[in-house]
Image: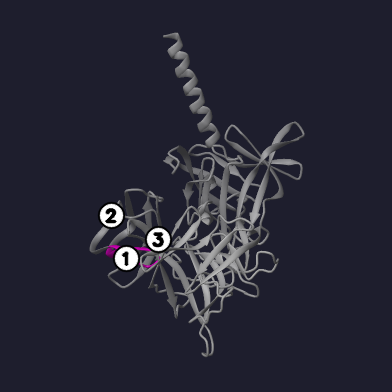
Amino acid sequence: MAKLKLIILLITAVHCFGQQKTLKFVHSENLWQMSRPAWISGPSYWQKSFSKDSIKIGDKYYFKEMKDDKFYPGWMDTGSYFREENGRVYELKDQREILHYDFNLNVGDSLLNEGNAKLKVKKVENIITSDGLSRRKLIFDRFCGGSPIGEVFWIQGIGEMEKGYPLPLVCFTIDPEPVLDCFLQNGNVVYSHNVCLDPNLYKTMVSSEYIWQVNVSRPALPGVIERLYRFGPPKTINSKSYRELLKSEGHTPTSVNWSGTDMFFREEDSVVHYLENGVDIPYFDFTLQKGDKFDLRYGSTSSVFVIKTDTVLLADNKPRHRYYLGCDPSSDKHDVVWIEFIGDVYSFLFSYVMCSLLDPVETWELKCVFYADNYKDIFKADGVQGCFIANALDEKLDEKNVVKIYPNPAINEIEVEFQNPFKGSISIYDYTWKEHLKIDNIQQSKMKKLDITFLPNGMYILIFKENNGKTFSKKLVVQ
């Protein structure tokens, strides 16, 4: 019996230690994905975390705050130092400590930030985040000069939900404040406020998460046509999963309509295959090494060789292999350049500069590659000033009828709660604007439960259309 009690105590201690570690704010496994609205000066986003090793300053140990910026890729020291003790997070600033967060506060407690913004706890809840852990959610009234100026929300170990981390709570800030898009721990999504970018997303090309912006020209015809390409949802053909290549022409900043090309691709073990007359043809092989031979088959077959490889860091700060392919294995001259999971940097899918002569029906010139969920660019060709930015997915909520969706991210079911009774219809679309569900004739409802077990994992948009014609939307993550 004594031995059994000892085992139970050990298991309990390990569990509590693991949970304590998971709920820590200052930890190198934590990752905050941040953004600022694109309408200011183009899309701006960055990531923040902490150093793995601590540094002793005075008689205390601190961790460096690290930042990975879109415009200055690579983790860099911000010059700020943080430590955590008993649920309180301190920042070392000008050789003095500032209390940044206190996750132990209870209803009625107040604190005054150095920016003269007073916070008073009005509610404390226990919520379950996506990692299955219970975390304290603190809801504050915020005051400036004695006047209420809105609410602030904290989650234990994550920080401020609306404005991100670590934003000082000052009375007046310059709009727009940064936004916390997503919080991840050890690569797993724990909390999603807007859009989470999968840290491993870049390791696949045949995915509906990317959009390729391409200029298309035809021989003997003047001018170019701008197209957007992306891959559609999975489709089983010959017992294998393929995705159809979709395209959009004549799009506008607020309208992107996708149509099929009847071209189907699949990816397996970093090799991209194309289905041609029922036969699998390798299109890209991202496992190649220097000296390897590869057959390009785009209407005709040309054998090319890997002249050299290196690694490139793109705008999303993800390392990808780059391949220089040429017709002569004994020469250092290359004709084609691939980037892992991006494609041919000159023409996306079709490498027209080949060893045999070919007169293509269309020439594709790759301009940009960006994420489909938030239009943050990943790759830009030389000389390209700006990539396509769509406003079609912006959330435009009617202030008179704010809607909440929970849980979000969700798995099987969601509850939609309206501030005022809702009359109208609800539709669920994916990011190709394919409609998955529509409910009409909702009458004076303040709460609606929706079964979403049929939805594949991914990002969705709920469109709410009131009977008076007004519409608003909310984003939904299905895991």
Residue type highlighted by circle 1: Glu
In the rendered structure, does residue 424 fall within the stretch colored magenta?
Answer: yes
Structural crowding at the residue carrying mark 1, measured as other residues with C-alpha within 10 Å and reported as few (<14), some (14–19) or many (≥20): some
Q: Tell me residue 261's x, y (percent).
A: 39, 73
> In the rendered structure, which disc, 1 or 2, sits on the residue that comes first in sequence?
1
Residue corresponding to mark 1: 435
Q: Which stretch appears magenta?
A: 423-437
> In the rendered structure, which disc, 3 or 2, sits on the residue that comes first in sequence?
2
The N terminus lies in which quarter of the figure? top left
Say whether marks 3 and 1 touch (CB < 8 Å).
no
Disc assigned to residue 150:
none
Residue corresponding to mark 3: 474
Quarter of the image for residue 246 reads bottom left
Q: What is the basis of the colouring in this image?
A: one colour
Q: Is residue 219 left or right of residue 422?
A: right
Kindly identify the residue that appears in the image at 51 percent across and 45 percent down. 154
Secondary structure of the residue carrying numbered label 1: strand
Q: Tell me residue 288's x, y (percent).
A: 58, 56
Kindly identify the residue that appears in the image at 69 percent across and 37 percent down. 54
Residue corresponding to mark 2: 448
Give the main secondary structure of the magenta stretch.
Answer: strand
Q: Nearer the viewer, residue 290 or 373?
A: 290
